[in-house]
Image (tube, coloured by chain):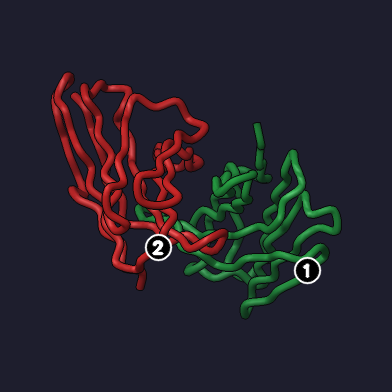
Chain colours: A red, B green
């Protein structure tokens, strides 16, 4: 079983609140990713990182930001949550061009 | 940008029937990966194909990578209820992004 963790697992929050979704992995992987997935739909890459102090935006336009200060930690922050941000957020990590290990996901609901 | 399409989007089969999902990329892929996501779960890696024309088997699952490295398929022989889920292919762009396909949702009717 992959050692990648996400907290919280579920979050219900009001519009305008700032939130941070946590993601940690203990495998020492350089590559980390954040995906957004609506129920039953495809995964959309919103951010990725090649390593410490390296972050890039994915194809899906997102109002979130990420940071990579430590190899094992890749938090995602929404400065002002909106109902359109309601979705599942999946974090993943990998070695170079190899399989991705996914965390259990955070199901976010913005009311 | 790169696009990875899968067909069909949904498939319902009787238990014991075969199932195939097809993955097509708008660009040549250096490799392709397949993932399975159970309802309510997260994607789990199944396999990676690298060579043109490569075929790999995992028990009842057969994976193929096209000669032109722009398409791939996953075939399940004699489906079981444990095969239920959504199957995604994923391919790399330049750099280290991976684009996931649109997915095929499989329902197996007992």
Query: B5 or B92: nearer the eye?
Result: B92
Disc 1 is placed on an element classified as loop
Position in image of residue A96 (x %, y %): 53, 60
Residue receiving disc 2: A29
Query: A48 or B99: nearer the eye?
Result: A48
Q: Residue at x 19, y 45 (%)?
A: A10
B101 relative position to B45: left or right: right
Position in image of residue A14 (x %, y %): 14, 24
Q: Residue at x 66, y 36 (%)?
A: B2
Residue receiving disc 1: B54
Disc 2 is placed on an element classified as loop
Position in image of residue B1 (x %, y %): 65, 31
Residue B13's tag is none
Cα distance in 3D space between marks 2 and 1: 27 Å
Q: Residue at x 42, y 46 (%)?
A: A49
Of badges 2 and 1, the one in the foreground is 2
């Amino acid at each position: 079983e992959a050692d990648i963790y996400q907290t919280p697992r579920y979050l219900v929050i009001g519009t305008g609140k700032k939130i941070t979704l946590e993601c940690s992995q203990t495998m020492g992987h350089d590559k980390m990713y954040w995906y957004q997935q609506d129920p039953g739909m495809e995964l959309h890459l919103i951010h990725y990182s090649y390593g410490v102090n390296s972050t890039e935006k994915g194809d899906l336009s997102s109002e979130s930001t990420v940071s990579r200060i430590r190899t094992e930690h890749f938090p995602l922050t929404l400065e002002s949550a909106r109902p359109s941000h309601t979705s599942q957020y999946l974090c993943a990590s990998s070695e170079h061009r190899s399989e991705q290990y996914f965390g259990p996901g955070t199901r976010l609901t913005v009311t | 940008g790169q696009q990875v399409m899968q067909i069909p989007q949904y498939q319902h089969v009787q238990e014991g029937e075969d199932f195939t999902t097809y993955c097509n990329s708008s660009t040549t892929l250096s490799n392709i990966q397949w993932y399975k996501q159970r309802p309510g779960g997260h994607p789990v890696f199944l396999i990676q194909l690298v060579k043109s024309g490569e075929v790999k088997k995992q028990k009842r699952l057969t994976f193929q990578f096209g000669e032109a490295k722009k398409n791939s398929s996953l075939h399940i022989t004699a489906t079981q209820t444990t095969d239920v889920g959504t199957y995604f292919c994923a391919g790399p762009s330049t750099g280290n992004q991976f684009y996931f396909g649109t997915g095929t949702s499989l329902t197996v009717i007992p």
